[in-house]
């Protein structure tokens, strides 16, 4: 249970030290995260004990023989699919309210016998796809695979489903729970411009590629470095063939989870400390949605 609106009991993703007693807290230990000071406190320390909060990034001189607690910047990875699920619930509740107001006596029956609009259920389906992929990605989490889920893009209504910061670069991952077989259709060539289109079954879904490219550009500008930023469309329930199937269009990979995971765990040129710094930077610039 949380100790207050500025505190949260959580399992630490990184090792730290208790702000009160200085006890070392290993990765995975349960502790109280204080949002105001961005420090942690072990659960053995009485939450009611008055302790003067330390300023973030500022340390008072430690007494002789006393271990000075470290200030730990805990990054919350976010909840996969959270914003899509909230939007589904909002639309569903709005429809129910509208029908019950218009039909006070028969509203319940109408709701029981009618289906939600496709534009509403799409949010629920999308949330399920993001959650499913998020669970798979979380199983890969380590010092060299750091994850962020459901990140809000400032000044925009859009969000980024998943970000993976790895030894080989940053992956911008858009999760899709679509039916049908993804395929690349190429038109043009010698006498007219080459045009690549993403098809899911018979549907033209090229706009999905456009969306990922915009997200990749945002992440590149935030990092402001030469770090490779990879765009990925990950289809969690598509009708993929037994052999082959994956493809790349305009620099964006189209694949399924089992094809994605080995790429995230592959060796690369970025060490764990650099990965952690990029992870913190992106978490602060792109808050949880």
Image (cartoon, rainbow, N blue to C red):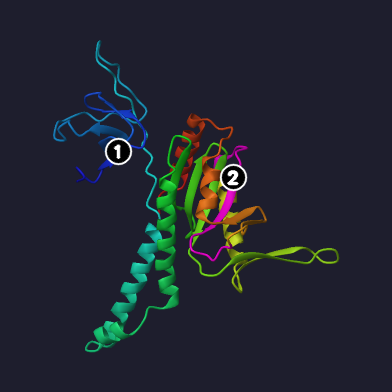
Residue 80, by quadrant, is: bottom left
Is residue 21 something one can see in this rendering? Answer: yes
The quarter of the picture where the C terminus appears is bottom left
Secondary structure of the residue carrying tag 1 is loop
Q: Residue at x 21, y 89 (%)?
A: 105
Residue 42 among those drawn in magenta: no
Does 146 appear above or below 240?
A: above
Q: Residue at x 51, y 56 (%)?
A: 174
Q: Residue at x 41, y 45 (%)?
A: 139
Range covered by the magenta-colored residues: 222-241
Question: Which sits in the foreground, 63 or 129?
Answer: 129
Residue 127, by quadrant, is: bottom left
Does 273 appear above or below 128?
A: above
Drawn side of residue 56 relative to residue 161, left or right: left
User: Looking at the picture, how far across and down is residue 18, in whole percent?
Assistant: 26, 28
In this view, the residue farthest toward the right is: 191
Return the residue at label 2: 229
Count of numbered circles on the image? 2
User: Looking at the picture, how far across and down is residue 236, in whole percent?
Assistant: 48, 60
Secondary structure of the residue carrying tag 2 is strand
Return the residue at label 1: 36
Residue 238 among those drawn in magenta: yes
Drawn side of residue 97 relative to residue 153, left or right: left
Residue 74, by quadrant, is: top left
């Amino acid at each position: 249970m949380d100790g207050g609106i500025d505190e949260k009991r959580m399992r630490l993703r990184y090792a730290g030290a208790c702000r009160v007693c200085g006890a070392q807290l290993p990765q995975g230990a349960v502790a109280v995260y204080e949002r105001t000071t961005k420090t942690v406190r072990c659960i053995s320390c009485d939450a009611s004990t008055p302790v003067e909060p330390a300023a973030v990034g500022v340390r008072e001189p430690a007494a002789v023989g006393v271990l000075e607690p470290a200030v730990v910047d805990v990054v919350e990875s976010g909840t996969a699919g959270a914003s899509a699920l909230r939007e589904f619930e909002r639309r569903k509740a709005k429809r129910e309210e509208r029908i019950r107001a218009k039909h006070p006596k028969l509203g319940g029956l109408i709701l029981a016998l009618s289906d939600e609009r496709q534009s509403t259920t799409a949010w629920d389906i999308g949330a399920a796809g993001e959650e499913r992929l998020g669970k798979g990605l979380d199983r890969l989490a380590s010092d060299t695979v750091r994850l962020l889920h459901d990140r809000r893009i400032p000044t925009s209504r859009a969000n980024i489903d998943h970000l993976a910061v790895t030894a080989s670069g940053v992956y911008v991952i858009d999760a899709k729970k679509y039916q049908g077989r993804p395929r690349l259709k190429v038109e043009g060539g010698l006498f007219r411009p080459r045009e690549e289109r993403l098809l899911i079954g018979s549907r033209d879904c090229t706009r999905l590629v456009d969306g990922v490219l915009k997200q990749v550009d945002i992440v590149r500008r935030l990092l402001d470095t030469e770090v490779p930023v990879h765009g990925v469309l990950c289809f969690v329930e598509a009708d993929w063939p037994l052999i082959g199937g994956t493809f790349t269009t305009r620099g964006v990979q189209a694949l399924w989870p089992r094809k994605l995971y080995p790429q995230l765990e592959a060796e690369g040129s970025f060490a764990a400390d650099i990965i952690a710094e990029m992870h913190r930077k992106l978490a602060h610039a792109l808050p949880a949605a």
